[in-house]
Structure formats: C-alpha cells, structure tokens
Amino acid sequence: MCSVENPRPHQAKLGSRAQRPLRVGLAIWLFYAATPGAAAVAPDAHRDAFGRLPRLLLRAVPGREVELQSLHEQFGGRVLHTSQRFGGWQVVELPRTVAPAAVMQKYQQSGLIAQVELDAPIQAAMTLPDDPFFQSGAQWHLNNYGQDGGIPDADVDAPEAWDVVREAPDLIVAVLDSGVRWTHEDLRANVWRNPRDGSPGLNPIAGTHDPWDDNGHGTHVAGLIGAVANNRKGVSGVVWRVRLMAIKVLDGSGNGLFSDALIGLDFALTNGARVLNISWTSTTNSLAFSNMLWQAGQVGVVVVCAAGNTGANLDLFPVWPAALRLPCQLTVAASTRTDDRYLTSAFGPQTVDLYAPGVSLYSTASAHDSAYASLSGTSMAAAVVSGAVALTIQRFPEANPQEIVRRLRDAVDVRPAFQGRCRSGGRLNLRRIVDLPRLEIVAGNPPLLQCMGQPGHTYVLWVSSDLYHWSSWTQVVLSSNNLTWMDPDFATFPSRFYRATPAP
C-alpha cells in the first residue's frame, strides 16, 4: 500500500550551514585573509537586488577619517555602519540620483580610500528546489531536518551537493523495471526519446516500444532518480535534469523473465545508457544476463542493484544480480530516517556496497499524471544511488565505472548500524562525493596555501609531516571561490603536506 507523509513547512536541517553560527575568531581570521580590493559584482543601476538604495563597502586610509566624512557629504553618501574594532570598514548608502560605479571610481581617485567595493548579493549555501513535496519535508531522504521523528542529517546531503552539480541533461539512466508512466507531469520532460521514432523506451514483454507502467513500481523508481526538479510540481529527483530510458521487463504483477531483461539490457547498452537501475532480484543466477552486465562495465556503464527485501545475509543466501560483485556494480541496502537499517533489507559484509535511504520515500506514482506516493524497500534505495551515480559521472566525466563505484563507497557516512553489514560500513552521502576542494601552493616566502571550492561551504584542512600521520588543522568557510592563508608552523617543520576534505 502507498501512503502520503504529512506535509510540514520546510526548514533547514539542524547543523546545516543555514543555521550553523560562525565563530567570531574564524570570522576575524577570514577577514584578514581576504584579498584586499577584490572586485564585486555591481548591483543593478541605482537600486540593489532588493530594491534598496545602492551601497558601498569602504575604509579610509589610516588618519584620514575626518576628510572621508567630508567626501561622503559631497557625494550624498550616508554612513550606515562603521566597524570600529575590525579595520574601520564602513557601509555607505548612496542616493538614488547617482550611478554607483561612477561614485566608487571617484572615491578611489580621492586618495582617501584604502579599499572600496560595490555591495553584492549573497545566497544561502544550499540549493533548494521549489517542488511542493520537497518544500513540505516529505522527501526526507534528500534533506532531513528531523521531520516526522527523523534524525537531522540522516540523509544524502542533496542540497549541499546540488550547490556543486544537480543536472546531467545528456546522461541516460536506463530503468529496467515495470515500465514508466512517461506522460507523468513530473517525469515527461526528463524521459529519454528514441531519436528514430520518438518512443520512450522498450517493452520486450509485448514486443513494442511502449514501456507503459501497469504496476507502479517503475514509475516510483524513475521519480526518485530523476523527477523534474524546481518546476513547482510534485517532487524532486536526485538528478534535476537527466534522460530516463524506460525499459519494461516486469509485468503488472511485478514478475518477469531474464530473457526479457536481456533484451532490455541489450537495448539500453546499444542506445547509450551510462547507468543501469535494477530494482529487482531473482533466486537464479542467469549466466547470460550476468555476462552482459560485465560487458556493460567494459563499455563505461555503472550497474546499480537492489539488495532485496529478504532480510538475509547475501554473503550466505545470495540473490541475483545483487550478489554478482562486479567491478562496475553497486549493491544497495535500505536505511531509515533515523540512520538505522530497514529490518527487511538484505545485507552482506562482502556483497552489499552501501546503504541508502529507502523507507517511506515519496515519489511519482502511476495512477494518473499527477499522482504521488510513498513506498519502502531496497528498490527505492537503489534508485537514490542511481541518481547519485548519474551526478558523479557528470562531475567526473573521465572516471571509469570502477572509479565511480570507489568514489561512492569512500564517501559514505559511516554509522554503527551499517558497520559489519556492508563493505563501506556507511550510508550514501552525495555531497562528500561531488564537493571536493582543491589545494594549490602560491609562491612566496613563506609560501601561501590556496583552497578552492564552493562558496559558502565548509572544508576541513589537514596537515602532515610524513604523509602517513594526518591531523585536522582547522575548518574554513569559503567566502568566495577560494581562500588563501599561511601555515603559521611552516618554518618549524622540514616538510609539510596538506589536504582538504568536505566538512562532516
């Protein structure tokens, strides 16, 4: 049965950047590390983005503060705030009758100003789509702030990851399932179309190119992967824009044959699919189908399989293709909104790669073109991972399937409930996969370090003297695309090595 979760007003999850206070000491340090005189983006002429009078941020040459006040009066500027303790920065509001860029130039030419810049917009460091069921909190797997008894942050950190990458418009994800209601309001714009005849996929069962879903399972899976996001309708997929190839290998009762799956798989590979979502299992291992999945990996395809809902250890009681352990394969178990394991989810310390949210996930339904429903199981968890794989391929287009698999395994949030039950010991975290900062050395004496990443995101800086023993040095929040600083202990050590990782 399908159930609808109670809609709640959207909140930022606890501990997210939207609510996390910035310590004063760090704020001061960032202030002094900022590049002097950095240019900002000019607001719209005579009004800022909020319809207010334009503003300048500036500070006087030391000792010339009194003269600066006379200059303000000359240009009609009004000082709204002066930071007396931290550099003397002023916020100056300009009259609507002057052009901000021209006035800023005159300030620069006066000889009284050490630095001046135009005010510029800022944004919350999370990308939040306007889809109603995301905004209501029903899609807890994407953004869990504790709604409906959940644990804050027991999710895949989708908003933080979406700051970095949220679309894979040319990438094809093949959904080998019960078909897809390809006319659904929240799917049709993302449905793959055959360039030869415009059809949305394949139906090997009927021998047609109409993969219509008469069960509902495939439509739900497709929506979790790639429901159209930010369209003010329904739900958001893990991928906002992607090409969903519908291949019907299960009938209206949810049953099928390997022969139809083989035909569907051949179609997917022939037509350029890069991700295969297989949210079904069998107690029989088909040699033919298994071999073709291995061939898929050889041509750059990642295979995502549901672990199954038997509650059994797949290392001892395997189901297929979940238990194949192919290099290009991810087998997925299901987790809950409290970062616990779904009790009916299969597991396997050697067979299952990771857990992903899979309980009470809200997605598209097949009853009509605007239907939505909540379902549970490893099928749902696999679909969430397929969406994550698509964004990982988009983020790292040169990576081969084995590297994509490794990136997802290495970036999990390790949790006690999953340790000893899967290879990674953790639950999918999309942000940690795609939000990788870079470090560079800036020549000088002493040299400077530059961290480059996503503005507004927090990164952990690590230091080592031998490449074996690493210690957490500090956390930084990037106020722009990069941040430059000096290691205060650089001269003490004969060699220093650095790295940066996304903050937890």
Image: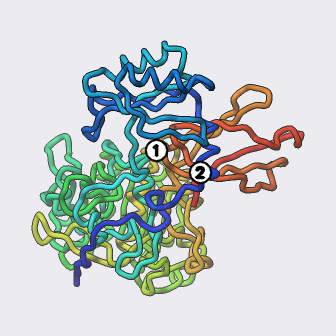
Q: Which residue is drawn at the image coordinates 45% and 46% (left, top)?
A: 299
Along the horizontal axis of the image, is 67 left or right of 52?
Answer: right
User: From what the image shows, is residue 179 above or below residue 7?
Assistant: above
Q: CA distance from mark 2 to mark 1?
A: 18 Å
- Which quadrant of the figure has residue 252? bottom left
Residue 71 location in percent, x, y? 44, 20
Residue 252 visible? The answer is yes
Q: Nearer the viewer, mark 2 or mark 1?
A: 2
Type of amino acid at the residue the image marks with label 2:
Tyr
- What residue is shown at x 42% (from left), y 44% (from top)? 394
How packed mark 1 is, by other alpha carbons closer than 10 Å (few <14, some 14-19, many 20 or more), is: some
**Image quarter of the C terminus:** bottom right
Count of labels shown?
Answer: 2
Q: Regarding mark 2 in the picture, which secondary structure is present there?
A: strand
User: Whole-percent x and y of residue 296?
Assistant: 44, 53
Residue type at mark 1 is Arg
Q: Which residue is mark 2?
A: 459
Residue 449 located left or right of residue 428: right
**In this figure, which colouring scheme has been used for the structure?**
rainbow
Most foreground residue, 72 or 139: 72
Write down the residue under mark 1: 395
Write down the quadrant of residue 442 in the picture. Answer: top right
Question: Quick one: SS at disc 1?
Answer: helix
